[in-house]
Image: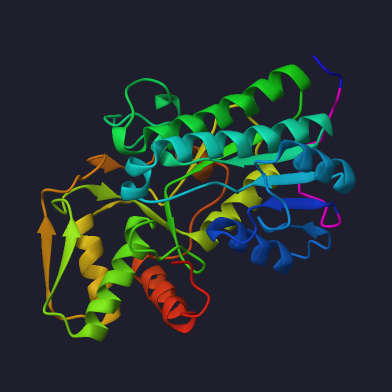
Amino acid sequence: MDETVCRVGPLDRSATTYIAGHRGLVGSALWRLFEKEGFSRLAGRSSAELDLTDRAAVFDFFEELQPEVVILAAAKVGGILANSTYPVDFLSQNLQIQTNVLDAAVAQRVPRLLFLGSSCIYPKHAEQPIREDSLLTGPLEQTNDAYAIAKITGILTVQAVRRQYGLPWISAMPTNLYGPGDNFSPTGSHVLPALIQRYDQALRNKADHVTNWGTGTPRREFLHVDDMATACLHLLNYFDGPQQVNVGTGEDHTLSEIASLVATSVGYTGTTRWDTSKPDGTPQKLLDVSTIRASGWIPTWSLSEGISDTIEWYRANQSVIRR
């Protein structure tokens, strides 16, 4: 094992901190929080400035920057339609991004790194709520298995780096995230922003009904992205362990209930229909969050407040939202 020794404790606010994916949903929330918390040497690069699938460019960037803290929030992401339609893209691009960033961080012996995954890493029929030790105990949900495999590879890479180099790198697995900065594309977004876009458009078009995918019965857990950002900082400050840490609220709702909350918040009074010919995805995905709760972190946003906040941001940022 490499003799590198890194002390784990509250982050130095003057440490050079690179947030990969700083313009995305999680990355932008992290940037806002870290600025608020007084981090004076934040670094971020847009995809136009740095292509994370370009291995040589990534290595050159790390050598020049010499980051002391890295948060890998960059990823190719999408909803059930995008994942099931383009599995090669989701597998290949995410593997390239992760491998390049993690290898470059190893080359520079970055003292502290947080890898962000996704709750889709867990088996489709995992016991609920899903514990961290459920990883690799059963088949994945087929509609997003390619993305899940890429994220699992990232987790195992972090664990391997800990064993081989002794660096206190960690992984966090968020539940379904939403909030300001999300992707509201009708075909490429996740379920909650897709519902917001759909109901808001129906309201503006005075449509008498909205049609959603599936049966409405699958249960999902949602976490506001600002809560995710505080969880990341909390873990970087206080957590050190090889196993990935679940991050969520510990509560879930049916998609029908979520749709009703969105419709009410948007102000839509028409009817909701469900297209049962479309896939439901995993029947339930609720995380066991006892590990992070025991470390002292709890979320602060309620779902209704978070949905209202997201709708307000969506309506105020029509010119810049991702579609």
Dominant secondary structure of the magenta stretch?
Answer: loop
Which color scheme is applied? rainbow
Q: Give the quadrant of the C terminus.
A: bottom left
Magenta stretch: residue 10 in it? yes
At 57% across and 24% down in the image, what residue appears?
156
Q: Which quadrant of the figure contains the N terminus?
A: top right
The answer to whether 130 appears left or right of 160 in the picture is: left
Spot occupied by residue 93 in the image (x, y as percentages of width and height): 55, 39
User: Residue 141 appears in which quarter of the rendering?
Assistant: top left
Residue in the foreground of this view, choosing between 161 and 229: 161
Quarter of the view holding residue 143 = top left
In the rendered structure, the answer to whether residue 94 lies left or right of residue 306 reads: right
Residue 175 or residue 202, whichever sits in front: 202
- Residue 124 in picture, x, y percent from top left: 29, 32
> Which residue shows up at 33% across the image and 43% down it?
85
Q: Is residue 309 magenta?
A: no
Q: Nearer the viewer, residue 278 or 265?
A: 278
| Residue 231 higher or lower than 310, as above or below | above
Whether residue 286 is visible to the viewer of this picture, yes or no, is no
Residue 84 rendering spot, x and y as whole percentages: 32, 41
Q: Quadrant of residue 314?
A: bottom left
Pick whichever, 161 or 12, lies toward us: 161
Q: Which residues are magenta?
A: 4-14
Q: Is residue 31 above or below residue 16?
A: below
Q: Residue furthest top?
A: 1
In the rendered image, residue 175, in percent from the top left (x then y), is placed at 42, 47
| Residue 219 visible at all | yes
Q: What residue do we see at 74% from left, 17% from top?
A: 164
Tally of numbered discs: 0
> Is 121 placed above or below 314 here?
above
